[in-house]
Image (cartoon, coloured by chain):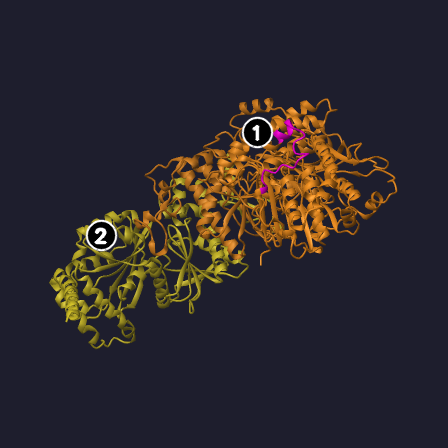
Chain colours: A orange, B yellow
């Protein structure tokens, strides 16, 4: 029997016990199985990876504007909120030991209801062995796919869709994983797959790849030769032995031959001159540990050397390593990294993949789903449903990898739009959205993890309050609390679990967890109330502004923009106040920071008008209506076109594109400047493609929705609208009608100014983002710790104005 | 005036150093200074064109002698004859084997005969009348080069080897046989030239001239290639390497040897790109070499010598140990152009306990040999492609009596490069470092 690493079957009896003890809580492992559509399976030597495509039915908050005809603006809320069911697509990947395959197949069969599929795509060495079992148990025909092709398809998929997929491994660093920003163009690259042998594949594009070489000295050699030398049967045990050995007892080093280093060639004394060179004698005994270590070095160095020779010959600098020899083993990742560094003198870095074990399953699935063409969509890792990367350091977690019955999951949500780079980024390949990498900054990590934990009660409370009619809201909210707290705890110990840990990823994880328990928009009611109240003040504010002279007005506009940004339920310091004093700030604009407004703050609004401004908005309510709109209005009246970009889906009290549509509609009804701009197509509303309080400019919506003239002419004319307009979050909202890309719009309108507003978008992310055009990043720091870190006080203003680079 | 005084002081201290030097080696040092100065003016001996070529070397040689005089006592009779004193040795002390070449002049004059010290004669007799020395020293009689002209002298070149682990015994013998009385400088290369320098100086009172390994290797190879192997070429290749019946060695004179990739397989492997006599670089190396073959064979089969390991390998079957492409795919892996006979995973079958029980020691030795050989071939091929060189010369003692590996390399280079690359071998495969060291005896420092 040949098996890959990772298997834990020491004796028959343990195995039996494990088999019996295994329970499969359906809501935790094979989730959404009842809606599963198509299946794929990758059976390796010891692990099985199952992939299935399913749909998730979950609640989404929808806003619906009332029929305003005949009603005074003050009588009723601006819009109504309803929670509706929506179906979205999700990819599930589950990894488990081959020992559980039968149990798992039974479980799947029992829970599979809706599938119409007749076949299951399969790959991997075990696909043949388990073929009849699968066919018998599931009643599906097994359709085999080529392993290498699947591997590469899977690799392309994760590199394209998961931002922090690749990492370099640094043994003694904390953390040992250094995640890489994926280059927007993932091709070409070299994939070195170290299975029993080694395959070296050059990948040119989605469909073009070539096996340019390989080696027979691979994982099988380590295992086979290691088994002969040490009488140890299991791969993991061999690695354990190697981790304890001293190769210098077995290998002949340069210093054993030279007495020191070979200086003229720059060969140090420690260098291995001849692997196993010292064992060419019958009078000495060698320990298993030493031999295993020597063997590991020999094989790792050899593979590294060949990989470098191939990379050089084909002029490739990105080299990814995978296969069971690597599969998360810190020891082999280290020895391979060492070898690559040595042979390329640091010019090439050995890259590893967070989801390396899933590549085959992902690729097999994609092969089977070609008619659905999953590659035309963007997919995002669902942090709530994915296990994340475990620390595999044998010293720290000796039993982690070996623990039996461990199921590992990866879930990916289909994003309704294909997301692309914002074309205004100066250099997309070097753009890093996040300002602080909490994986590397332990102090900041500690602070933010605690901060999110402290804020949890408030979020739970808000979630329950958002669904007053749902009887199970409290129960679900409690589940959410447990899930998110558990995630935070995991991240405390393993901050690298989902790639680089950032404030953005913490926020996104919270959104994913909320969605998981059907709290799609806990702040919907808050937003609704605040939008209502703020709208009532809009005309008053505009009139007040009009009465000022230009200089005063410009100062007041910037002040209003910043003042509005204080109203942020995402900031604990503010939400605490808002909780206790709901009337806070509605009557008088707080001015704790007027003196901080840069002088001349109005320079943006002076000088020749901009051609077109792209404005990423933040909070609902005062921020949007009394801060952003008057500012936008001023720009419009100067002849600047405006693209207002708002979130596609809800996050905190950030305004969503559907809410923005209604708000804009209402403002247009009151204000001729806005109305005219809409009618003349000079004010465009687009969705950013994001459902996060932060913003990753590498993944913005490439199609957009403008408020079509037809819709607007109806509501703007005095004819009563024949029906109400429903604005929902994806997918109905998404834009099949006007599907020009945001990227295209930005380019077409010759956007020459980008305004990014709010802590999430302008501080936690994009603070250092370099753009091709003039940009303004502004926010009020509503967090004492962060303010302190940036060298200011709470409610300090960040007003970062940058000219276009020459 | 002051300035002059200053320079005088400098010259005084400078001459002081010289005085010290002379003083230390005074026994013959004074004469050496004289000789050294006179030598270049002396008319060249009418020995023919070879001597002409060596002219600058001689001058260098004499200078070296004058410097070395401080520590060893040169025999000036030899200097008069424009050659280093006999005996002429070159030694290459590797990780596993010591390679020694000894030049036995056939044209000794009566005058020289009288001048040679007794010890020299006894050493010569010992070396040339025996084929084995001690328990492990062996003279490769079949490699002996007859009537070779070196430094204007005709003689036979002898090739001797013994394991590096016996260096202790060698040093002891040197002490007992009073090598130091030969008053010679030993030209040595290989790591051992550094490692054993101290012992040779303190125990044997023998001065080493340490020489660069790669330089010696290349000069030695080029020299032997150009002088040939007793009338035929030293370099050859294999025709039909896969067919045991039709396979044969074919001479391949390296008339224009450059560029070539030189793969030296000793305990470890060094790969050099050679563009001319003096323009070469070490491209890379691998620790998986002859030492690995022997080391693993010892561990896996309990054998103890290279010859024993090779013998076992020749009787084994590697396909019982290695997993082939056809074992996985049932035949060729067509999509990737991999033939079914190609090894997919070396020792891959040994992951399985059942298959472990079916293999013999011979099979394991064979698999070890095949694995290491193919790996070297693969790295060599990649280097050749990267360096854009199409002739690859494999040398080193791993190839000694190892036709199996040479045929494997021949086939691998040809097959994987689709006929682009040619694997070449040399009759004196393991001795080029030692020959290069010997040649250095006649070179300027």
> Which segment did they paint magenta?
A575-594
Q: Which mark is residue B200?
A: 2
Q: Position of residue A481 (x, y in %)?
A: 62, 26
Q: Which residue is mark 1?
A: A453
Q: Residues within 10 Å of mark 2 (few under 14, many from 20)?
A: many
Specify the quadrant of the image occupied by residue A486. Answer: top right
Tell me whether marks 1 and 2 sit on the same chain: no
> Observer-nearest residue: A755 or A418?
A755
Give the residue displayed 14% in from the left and 61% down from the top.
B20
Q: Residues within 10 Å of mark 1 (few under 14, many from 20)?
A: some
Q: Are marks 1 and 2 in contact (CB under 8 Å)?
A: no
Secondary structure found at label 1: helix
Q: Residue under mark 1: which chain is it in? A: A
> Observer-nearest residue: A630 or A725?
A630
Give the residue displayed 18% in from the left and 65% down from the top.
B66
Tell me if residue B11 can be seen.
yes
From the image, give the main secondary structure of the stretch colored magenta: loop
Specify the quadrant of the image occupied by residue B107. Answer: bottom left
Q: Is residue A209 positioned above or below A434 on the image?
A: below
Q: Which mark is residue A264?
A: none
Residue depth check, mark 1 versus mark 2: number of the one nearer the observer? 1
> Observer-nearest residue: B8 or A198?
B8
* Residue A588 forms part of the magenta stretch: yes
What distance separates the C-alpha of mark 1 from that of mark 2?
73 Å
Q: Position of residue A251 (x, y in %)?
A: 37, 44
Give the residue displayed 58% in from the left and 59% down from the top.
A806
> Observer-nearest residue: B184 or A538?
A538
Q: Is residue B430 left or right of residue B63?
A: right
Check the picture and name the quadrant holding the N terminus of chain A.
top right
């Amino acid at each position: 029997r040949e098996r890959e690493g990772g298997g834990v079957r020491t004796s028959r009896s343990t195995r039996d016990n494990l088999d019996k003890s295994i329970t499969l809580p359906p809501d935790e492992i094979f989730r959404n199985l009842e809606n599963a559509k198509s299946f794929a399976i990758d059976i390796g030597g010891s692990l099985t990876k199952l992939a299935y495509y399913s749909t998730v039915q979950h609640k989404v908050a929808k806003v619906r504007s009332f029929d305003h005809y005949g009603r005074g603006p003050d009588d009723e809320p601006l819009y109504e909120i309803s929670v509706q069911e929506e179906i979205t697509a999700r990819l599930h990947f589950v990894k488990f030991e081959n020992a559980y395959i039968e149990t798992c197949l039974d479980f799947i069969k029992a829970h599979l209801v809706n599938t119409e599929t007749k076949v299951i795509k399969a790959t991997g060495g075990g696909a043949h062995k388990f073929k009849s079992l699968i066919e018998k148990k599931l009643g599906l025909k097994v359709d085999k796919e080529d392993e290498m092709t699947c591997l590469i398809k899977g690799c392309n998929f994760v590199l394209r869709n998961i931002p922090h997929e690749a990492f370099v491994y640094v043994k003694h660093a904390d953390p040992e994983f250094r995640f890489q920003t994926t280059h927007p163009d993932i091709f070409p690259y070299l994939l070195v797959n170290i299975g029993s042998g080694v395959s070296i594949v050059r990948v040119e594009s989605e469909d073009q790849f070539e096996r340019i070489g390989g080696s027979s000295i691979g994982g099988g050699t380590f295992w086979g030769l290691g088994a002969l030398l040490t009488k140890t049967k299991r791969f993991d045990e061999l690695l354990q032995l190697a981790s304890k050995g001293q190769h210098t007892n077995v290998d002949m080093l340069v210093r054993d031959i030279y007495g020191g280093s070979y200086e003229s060639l720059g060969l140090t004394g420690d260098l291995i001159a001849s692997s196993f060179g010292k064992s060419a004698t019958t009078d000495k005994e060698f320990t298993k540990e030493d031999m295993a270590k020597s063997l590991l070095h020999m094989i790792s160095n050899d593979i590294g050397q060949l990989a470098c020779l191939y990379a050089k010959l084909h002029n490739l600098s990105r080299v990814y390593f995978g296969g069971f020899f690597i599969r998360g083993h810190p020891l082999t990742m280290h020895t391979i990294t060492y070898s690559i560094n040595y042979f390329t003198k640091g010019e090439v870095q050995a890259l590893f993949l967070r989801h390396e074990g899933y590549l085959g399953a992902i690729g097999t699935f994609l092969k089977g789903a070609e008619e659905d063409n999953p590659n035309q969509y963007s997919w995002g890792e669902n942090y709530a449903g994915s296990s994340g990367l475990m620390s595999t350091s044998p010293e720290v977690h000796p039993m982690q990898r070996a623990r039996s019955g461990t199921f590992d999951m990866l879930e990916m949500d289909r994003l309704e739009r294909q997301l692309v780079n914002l074309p205004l980024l100066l250099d997309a390949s070097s753009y890093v959205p996040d300002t602080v990498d909490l994986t590397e900054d332990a102090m900041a990590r500690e602070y933010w993890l605690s901060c999110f934990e402290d804020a949890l009660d408030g979020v739970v409370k808000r979630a329950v309050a958002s669904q007053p009619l749902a009887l199970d809201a409290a129960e679900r909210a409690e589940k959410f609390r447990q899930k998110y707290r558990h995630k935070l705890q995991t991240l405390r110990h393993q901050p690298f679990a989902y790639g680089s840990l950032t404030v953005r990823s913490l926020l996104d994880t919270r959104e994913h967890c909320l969605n998981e328990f059907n709290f799609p928009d806990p702040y919907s009611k808050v937003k609704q109330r605040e939008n209502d109240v703020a709208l009532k003040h809009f005309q008053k504010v505009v009139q007040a502004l009009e009465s000022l002279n230009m200089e005063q007005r410009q100062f007041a506009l910037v002040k209003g923009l910043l003042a509005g940004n204080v109203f942020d339920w995402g900031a604990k310091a503010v939400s605490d106040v808002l909780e206790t004093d709901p009337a806070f700030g509605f009557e008088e604009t707080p001015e704790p920071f007027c003196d901080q407004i840069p002088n001349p703050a109005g320079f943006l609004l002076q000088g020749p008008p901009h051609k077109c401004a792209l404005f990423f908005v933040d909070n609902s309510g005062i921020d949007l209506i009394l801060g952003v709109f008057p500012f936008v209005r001023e720009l419009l009246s100067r002849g600047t076109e405006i693209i207002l970009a708002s979130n596609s889906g809800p996050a905190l009290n950030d305004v969503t594109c559907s809410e923005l549509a209604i708000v804009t509609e209402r403002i247009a009804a009151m204000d001729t400047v806005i109305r005219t701009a809409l009618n003349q197509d000079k004010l465009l509303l687009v969705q950013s493609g994001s459902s996060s309080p932060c913003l990753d400019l590498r993944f913005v919506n490439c199609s957009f929705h403008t408020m079509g003239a037809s819709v607007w002419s109806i509501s703007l004319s005095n004819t009563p609208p024949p029906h109400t307009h429903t604005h929902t979050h994806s997918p109905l909202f998404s834009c099949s009608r006007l599907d020009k890309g945001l990227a295209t719009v930005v380019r077409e309108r010759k956007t020459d100014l980008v305004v990014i507003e709010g802590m999430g978008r302008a501080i936690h992310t994009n603070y250092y983002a370099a753009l091709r055009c003039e940009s303004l990043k502004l926010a009020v720091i509503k967090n004492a710790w962060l303010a302190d870190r940036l060298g200011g006080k709470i409610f300090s203003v960040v007003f970062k104005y940058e000219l276009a680079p020459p | 005036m002051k300035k002059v005084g200053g320079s005088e002081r400098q010259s005084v201290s400078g001459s002081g150093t010289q005085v010290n030097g002379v003083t230390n080696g005074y026994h013959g040092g004074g004469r050496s200074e004289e000789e050294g100065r006179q030598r270049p003016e002396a008319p060249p001996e009418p020995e023919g064109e070879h001597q002409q070529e060596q002219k600058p070397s001689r001058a260098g040689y004499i200078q070296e002698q004058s410097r070395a005089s401080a520590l060893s006592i040169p025999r000036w009779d030899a200097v008069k004859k424009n050659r280093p004193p006999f005996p002429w040795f070159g030694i290459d002390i590797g990780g596993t084997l010591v390679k020694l070449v000894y030049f036995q002049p056939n044209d000794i004059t009566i005058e020289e005969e009288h001048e040679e010290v007794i010890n020299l004669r006894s050493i010569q007799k010992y070396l040339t009348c025996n084929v084995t020395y001690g328990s492990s020293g062996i003279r490769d009689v079949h490699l002996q080069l007859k009537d070779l002209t070196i430094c204007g002298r005709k003689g036979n070149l002898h090739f001797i080897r013994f394991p590096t682990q016996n260096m202790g015994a060698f040093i002891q013998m040197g002490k007992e046989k009073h090598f130091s009385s030969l008053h010679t400088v030993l030209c040595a290369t290989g790591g051992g030239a550094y490692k054993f320098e101290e012992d040779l100086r303190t125990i044997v009172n023998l001065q080493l001239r340490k020489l660069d390994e790669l330089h010696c290797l290349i000069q030695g190879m080029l020299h032997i290639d150009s002088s040939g192997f007793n009338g035929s070429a030293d370099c050859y290749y294999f025709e039909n390497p896969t067919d045991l019946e039709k396979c044969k060695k074919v001479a391949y004179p390296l008339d224009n040897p450059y560029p070539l990739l030189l793969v030296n397989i000793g305990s470890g492997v060094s790969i050099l790109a050679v563009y001319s006599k003096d323009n070469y670089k070490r491209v890379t190396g691998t620790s998986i070499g002859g030492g690995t073959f022997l080391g693993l064979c010892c561990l896996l089969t309990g054998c103890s010598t290279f010859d024993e390991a090779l013998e076992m390998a020749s009787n084994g079957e590697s396909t019982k140990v290695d997993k082939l492409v056809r074992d996985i795919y049932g035949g060729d892996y067509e999509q990737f152009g991999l033939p079914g006979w190609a090894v997919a995973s070396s020792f891959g079958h040994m992951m399985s306990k059942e298959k472990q029980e079916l293999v013999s020691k011979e099979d394991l030795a064979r698999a070890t040999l095949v694995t290491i050989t193919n790996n070297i071939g693969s790295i060599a091929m990649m280097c050749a492609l990267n360096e854009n060189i199409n002739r690859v010369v494999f040398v080193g003692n791993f190839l000694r009596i190892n036709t199996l590996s040479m045929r494997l390399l021949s086939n691998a280079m040809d097959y994987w490069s689709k006929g682009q690359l040619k694997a070449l071998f040399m009759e004196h495969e393991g001795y080029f470092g030692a020959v290069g060291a010997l040649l250095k005896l006649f070179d300027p420092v």
